[in-house]
Amino acid sequence: MLVLLILAMDTATGDIRAVEFTSSHEGDSALLPDLLAQIPEAEGIGSITADGACDTRRCLDAILARGAEPIIPIRRNGRMWKPDCPAAIRRNETLRATQRFARALWKKGSGYHARSRAEAQMNCLKLLGARYSDRLTRSRSAGGGTPHPHRDPEPLPGHGNGQNRTREVSQKGHITL
């Protein structure tokens, strides 16, 4: 079983604002409301950027409840939802814009590209964790004894065997899932 580390990251500063750990069996969309709950209500969120896994009523409801703008691409096979709630109306607007301007233009115009900055920051953390974990494993297997406290420190939590996903949050900025 893989452990997923899910972060809410401020795109402007790179600060981690919220964290969730979960098994690989739980989908990304189930954790978005929990991540948002970790950010104080007094701190405004301008927009939330996420991948198509968060193209759900539950995620859109949570985003709109915080007064943020959802920037979530519609899944390729996405269809219009019955316009019976604000989340469905907002999603239908996104679907129409995607169909009218093409997916690539919608992503560029909506600011979806901000998500890639958070992913790049997360990849740096993953590489650091992997190098740290590899060094620790090699030194323990080569020495066969107890690890040296300065040369063989404990691995960082969430690094090594786990998988990392990024969620990005900015004060009056962006959350990327």
Image (tube, rainbow, N blue to C red):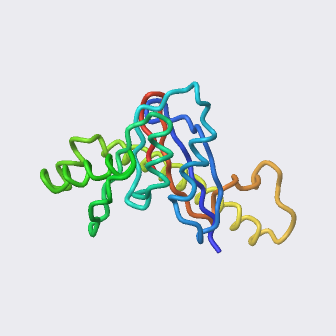
Q: Position of residue 164 (x, y in %)?
A: 55, 58
Q: Is residue 66 left or right of residue 82?
A: right
Give the residue at x 43% y 61%. 53
Q: Is residue 149 left or right of residue 52?
A: right
x then y, percent, for residue 105: 17, 49
Identify which residue, 50 or 137, lies in the foreground: 50
**Residue 79 pos. (x, y %):** 27, 65
In which quadrant is the N terminus drawn?
A: bottom right
Identity of the residue furthest to the top in this view: 42
* Picture residue at 52% right of the left edge, 60% below the top: 28
Figure disc tally: 0
Image point (53%, 65%), residue name: 27
Which is nearer the eye, 65 or 130?
65
Whether residue 134 can be seen here:
no
Q: Is residue 127 visible?
A: yes
Q: Residue placed at 71% from the left, 61% from the top?
A: 136
145 lies above or below 101: below
Residue 134 located left or right of residue 107: right
* Residue furthest to the left: 100
Q: Which residue, as the protein is rendered here, is positioned at the far front?
A: 84
Q: Vertical placement of 155 versus 145: above or below?
A: above
Vertical arrangement, residue 48 with respect to residue 147, above or below:
above
Front residue of 19/81: it is: 81
Question: Residue 85 location, x and y as percent?
Answer: 39, 49
